[in-house]
Amino acid sequence: MKQASRDQQPTTFFQPAAGFVGDVIPFLYNGAFHLFYLHEDRDDPDSGTPWGLAVTEDFVTFEDLGDVLPSGGASAPDFNAYTGSVVAGDGVLHLFYTGHNPKRLGPDGVTPVQVVLHAISNGDATQWSKLPADTFEAPTGYEPGDWRDPFVFRVPGEDTWRMLLAARHDEGPARRRGVVAQLRSRDLTSWQMDRPFWNPGRYITQECPDVFEWNGWWYLVYSEFSESFTARYRVAPTPDGPWSVPVHDTVDGRAFYAPKTVARDGRRFFVGWIATREDSADDGAWQWAGTMSVLEALQEDDGSLRFRLPSEVLDQFNRPQPLHWRNAATGVGAAAHQLRGDVPDGLWTAVTDELMEQSFRVTVEVDIEPDTRECGVLLRSTTDGDGAYIIRLEPQRNRMVFDRWPRRITGPMQWQISGDVPHVTELERPCALPAGRHKLDIVVDGTVCVAVLDESVSLSTRIYDRTEGHLGLFVGEGRATFPQAQLLHRSNTTRKEAQ
């Protein structure tokens, strides 16, 4: 068992002292967010996956309570205790989760089976008693190796609980058998199969299903890796559909995965994880698990959602850094009111004299004129603006992308770079970019970077190779003005202390 950590310093993005955060199971309990998470060690030999627990009031200061649901052991069906949900019923807390053991193979002799397991608590969220007799596996008609992520909820007015599962039909095209299976129970112990909750015939499976109601709209949130490695949502007038696809149906990009939701005081939060990369390098392959991250959803009249960083996360960065700007091409200083690029057929770049700290917030307002091809922000830039991480707005393509320069180098010749890769693969976010004023909020904490455009569109990623540098702004082939460009650092006090 991993030991608890009582460190409650502001961290912005939670990660245990040892290991990484996999899928998060958020649960509001006694007014605080209880964030159960799959505790990934990446140890060799593998010791199994337990559930850890971090508690927070504000998604800024976390108390890590250590592992609370252990692996069942080498021969147990829950050697890996994978994703599930927590509910309160009849004065008892119920925890449902996925059991997986690579040694317990299904009928094909190759694929490990997955089962649903049950544990209860008398109210202490750190103490759970497993109920092995309640374990059940996939019934006939479903793949035994895809029967996971139980999500239990109750529709007001119904006398039964519902359980949703990420499942697969055992027949049909291999890439399109995914189904959100549905079961019902009156006592949270015995479960009976019901008709599928959602059967789109589109994905390998829909992982980590999550359902909630908000102001008369019902939402289904899920993660998929068939079309894109991303989280999506659907909207319906009832919990039984019909489900519609919003114009922009993704929560974030490739790096932010498996969010599940929790609400408090009329606000809805999506809690997931930002993946690490192999070898802690910008070119490394994405890995399973990483660092916890939270986005707040905002609801539109038509039921569609926008996503932003919670105000509590932004407000902890309350120490502004005085900035001195310099035209990167000429080296001439520029006052804040002179931050304007007027380059119909070229590139304008301004860079600060000051270096950025490891953790910071950048807030930038940009007024984009018609027919501008691109503009945006440089992070950890060189003094000439040529090397940097790049948050780029492309109005003609209605997208925000993450880029970096230099890109991947494949050989010794100057042309052997990934110049034909227009941005980091899978880090492209569709967005509305009409001419006019827009706002970028960017938070960086070590290797984690989250950018939000107009409190609507989120783009999360990792930044490893460039560990220091300057703040920069740029305009390419067009005209744009930056009425505000601010760099803020975290103060030495928590948000509550600052108030």
Image (cartoon, rainbow, N blue to C red):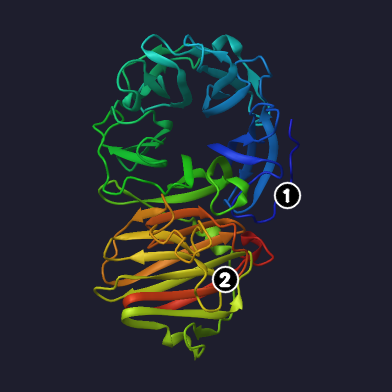
- Residue 308 on image: x %, y %: 43, 56
Q: Secondary structure at mark 1?
A: loop
Question: In the rendered image, which quarter is residue 144 located in?
Answer: top left
Residue 7 - label: 1
Instruction: Look at 53% across and 57% down and name the residue there.
Output: 449
Instruction: Look at 65% across and 36% down and name the residue there.
Output: 42
Q: Which of these two is toward me, 377 or 466? A: 466
Q: How many angstroms separate mark 2 from mark 1 (CA)?
A: 24 Å
Q: Which residue is mark 2?
A: 488
Asked if residue 347 is positioned above or below residue 46 in the image, the reply reads below
Q: Left or right? Give the position of 405 relative to 322.
A: left
**Number of numbered discs overlaid on the protein picture:** 2
Q: Say if residue 263 shows up in the picture.
A: no
Q: Quadrant of the N terminus?
A: top right
Q: Say if residue 471 shows up in the picture.
A: yes
Asked if residue 426 is positioned above or below residue 36 in the image, the reply reads below
- Residue 14 on image: x %, y %: 62, 48
Kindly identify the amino acid type of the residue bearing the numbered disc 1: Asp
- Residue 318 on image: x %, y %: 58, 69
Q: Which of these two is toward me, 315 or 216? A: 315
Kindly identify the amino acid type of the residue bearing the numbered disc 2: Leu
Say few, some or many: other residues with alpha carbon within 10 Å of mark 1 (under 14 / 14 to 19 / 20 or more): few
Q: Residue furthest bottom?
A: 332
Mark 2 or mark 1, which has the lower sequence index? Answer: 1
**Mark whose residue sits in front, 2 or 1:** 2
Q: Left or right? Give the position of 171 relative to 415.
A: left
